[in-house]
Amino acid sequence: NQKYRARLNISKPGVLYPTMRDRIALINGGSVDEIIGLAKFVVEKVVEEGKNTGGGRGKGDEEVIKLIVPNATAGLVIGKNGQEIKNLNDETKAKVIIRSQRESPVDGERVLVITGDVDARDAALTRLIELIAPDEINVRHNGKMDYARRDDRDRRDDSRDRRDDRRDDRD
């Protein structure tokens, strides 16, 4: 039974990341190694639960890990001319993609998606946390995250957007 000084806050049932069906797990505090250890523990538990319920899967039944970071922190992951993310993908054999700002359901945030086999995902998660955990912008952003209030507003906005899309389709 590993003990961590890093803190884990999981959103209440029904409080999901906007436009996704994912609950939010926020890990902060402690050392980078503790954050990595706790993140891996959470992923392991989610994968176990997913196997029992059929959840947590992406394309082709491949497990998917998603991280949410501020736009500025995404730049650390991308690196100059995309070199950092290219190296990360090559070295870990995972596929890490960063969704564009336009695709993000929350202003100022980006979604990082990690796919690949278990070892590749694990290696990529470790490298990503090593990059983003010490970033001051990321640390400040994590202290302000509150999707519970955003969730209802975003659901209304999504519903409005779908109605607008249907109208566009008829035109």
Image: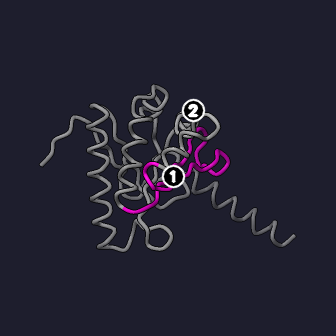
| Screen quadrant of the C terminus | bottom right
- The label on residue 96 is 1
Few, some or many residues within 10 Å of mark 1 (<14, 14–19, 20+): many
Q: Which residues are magenta?
A: 91-117
Give the mark nearer the N terminus: 2 vs 1.
Answer: 2
In percent of width and height, residue 162 lies at 69, 64
In percent of width and height, residue 27 lies at 34, 41
In percent of width and height, residue 124 lies at 41, 49
Residue at 12 percent of width and 49 percent of height? 1
Type of amino acid at the residue the image marks with label 2:
Ala
Q: What is the secondary structure assignment of the residue under circle 2? A: helix
Q: Is residue 37 left or right of residue 95?
A: left
Relative to 63, say whether 150 is above or below.
above
The extreme right residue here reads 171
Is residue 71 or residue 166 the one in the foreground?
71
Few, some or many residues within 10 Å of mark 2 (<14, 14–19, 20+): some
Which residue is label 2 attached to? 72
